Amino acid sequence: MNEISCSSWLRYLLFFSSLSLHLIPGLTDDSKDGKKKAASSKSKGTGVVIICIVILIVVLLAVFLFKYWQKKKREEQYARLLKLFEEDDELEVELGLRD
């Protein structure tokens, strides 16, 4: 399975976060008053930071859950493998091939 490098993940994260910022109404600068413009610009900056943090948290949570799922799946497969070999030993004893 091909693994995506860290820089590729960062590129994808940056792309999707910038795309999501274009979809949020209210980030366009339509005000003509200087005071409103300064306040609007400040609130936009905090909004952008909050959105980036939320996207980062969601991505990190998804990666954590995927790794956790992989670990559980691996443990389950290993347990099945051990059970398979235990059953073979019992079968050999029952057939008299091994004491």
Image: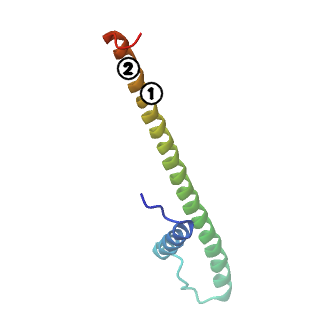
Kindly identify the residue that appears in the image at 63 percent across and 88 percent down: 33
Q: Which residue is the site of mark 1?
A: 82
Quick one: SS at disc 2?
A: helix
Q: Residue furthest left?
A: 95
- Up the image or down, 79 lies above or below 70; here it is above
Kindly identify the residue that appears in the image at 56 percent across and 66 percent down: 6
- Up the image or down, 49 lies above or below 66; here it is below
Quick one: SS at disc 1?
A: helix
Q: For the N terminus, which image quadrant? A: bottom left
Q: Which residue is the site of mark 2?
A: 87
In this rendered view, identify the residue nearer to me: 29 or 84: 84
Q: Which amino acid does label 2 sit on?
A: Glu
- Up the image or down, 68 lies above or below 11; here it is above
Res 37 → quadrant:
bottom right
Kindly identify the residue that appears in the image at 41 percent across and 25 percent down: 85
- Up the image or down, 41 lies above or below 54; here it is below
Mark pair 2, 1: CA separation: 9 Å
Q: Which amino acid does label 1 sit on?
A: Leu
In this rendered view, identify the residue nearer to me: 96 or 33: 96
91 left or right, relative to 19: left
Query: Residue 48 at x, y = what percent?
Result: 60, 71
Kindly identify the residue that appears in the image at 55 percent across and 49 percent down: 64
Query: Residue 42 at x, y = what percent?
Result: 67, 76
Query: Residue 29 at x, y = what percent?
Result: 55, 84
Res 82 → quadrant:
top left
Query: Residue 36 at x, y = what percent?
Result: 64, 82
Q: How many labels does the image show?
A: 2
* Label 2 environment density (alpha carbons within 10 Å; few <14, some 14–19, many ≥20): few
